Amino acid sequence: MMSKQNTLKKAPAKKSAMFFLTLALVITSLLYVFPLLWFLLSAFKPGTELFAYPLNVFPENPTVQNFIDAWTTLDFFRYFSNTLISAVTTTVLTILASAACGYAFAKYDAKWLRFFFICIIATTMLPTEVIMNPTFSVIRALGLYDNLLGIIIPSINTATGIFMFRTFFVSVPNDLIESARIDGASDGTIFLKIMLPIASPIIMTLGIFSFQWRWNDYIWPLIVLNDPKKYTLQVAIRSLVGAENINWTILIAASVISILPLLLVFLAFQRWILDSNLDSGIK
């Protein structure tokens, strides 16, 4: 009887706690959404409204002329192509290289591999600026300066991707690999036909992150690329910013156009992030 009364007393307190937690979550979400909403709506504002006082969130006279002007001002097709080639190529190679390294670190027992893995993880503590100078020297010595390969090759191996795949493959039972070896499967077959398919959630997660990193990369393409025809999208958009004048309407509209591929990639592949079935290969 006493336990039932205690349960009844705890129920209102639990509901109140859930209410305040939900309210806090809604407020936090609005704080994050508001700047993004302002940014998107500003792309539809004419120049007279963009900095009008008092500021209005919603455009009074919405227009798509900003997007037309941005598209005609920049050679978007060329810059989209350059960025897409570098982002897709780097993402595919990053997934393959990270998966192979992660599999070796997880399933091969060698002391030097453990030491090598620690060295790779330690590179995450180095600022990007520290390795830019030696990397640029290597790229220039290889004749890859002012070439898309110069921004693709240095970005293939990432400590984050290797760590993600190693952590995943460690959780895969060794019995699955031993069973495949008993059936006559080679290490290459095991990796390509067994380990990679069950690692699809990690592949999609790293793919989304890698594509986003390479699509938004600005500093390294700015250093390596010199020919304006080879510019990536972010470098080309930066060229809209002059020394004295900035056409904010075109700049904002071009920025909105540039994030559309990222949004489409995330919406198309986000379901794979949580879709994990490690036991699918075990019978």
Image: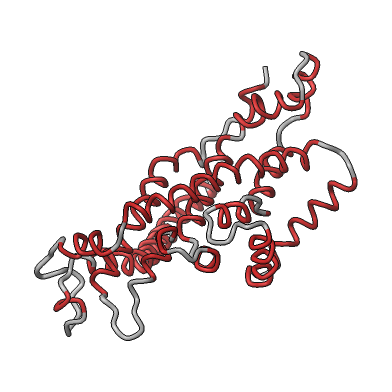
Which residue is at the front of the view, 95 or 268?
95
What colour scheme governs how the chains and residues are painted in the rendered image of this protein? secondary structure
Q: Does residue 248 appear to the left or right of 236 in the view shown?
A: left
Residue furthest to the right: 111
Residue 179, quarter of picture: top right
How far across and how far down the image is residue 81, in percent?
A: 39, 49
Residue 188 pos. (x, y %): 72, 27
Quarter of the C terminus within the rendering: top right
Give the left or right position of residue 220, taking residue 133 as reference: left
Residue at the top extreme, as displayed: 183
Measuring 37% from the left and 62% from the top, which residue is drawn there?
A: 29
Q: Which residue sits at x=64%, y=24%?
A: 193
Residue placed most toward the observer, 179 or 51: 51
Task: Answer with left or right where residue 70 lies relative to residue 1.
Answer: left
Name the residue: 51% across, 57% down.
Answer: 213
Query: Residue 90 location, x and y as percent?
Result: 55, 48
Q: Nearer the viewer, residue 21 or 154?
A: 154
Which image quadrant for residue 231? bottom left
How many numbered circles does the render carry? 0
Q: Residue at x 55, y 64 (%)?
A: 224
In the picture, residue 70 is in which quadrant?
bottom left
Furthest residue in direction left, as rendered = 61
Residue 114: give x, y in percent of width and height.
Answer: 84, 49
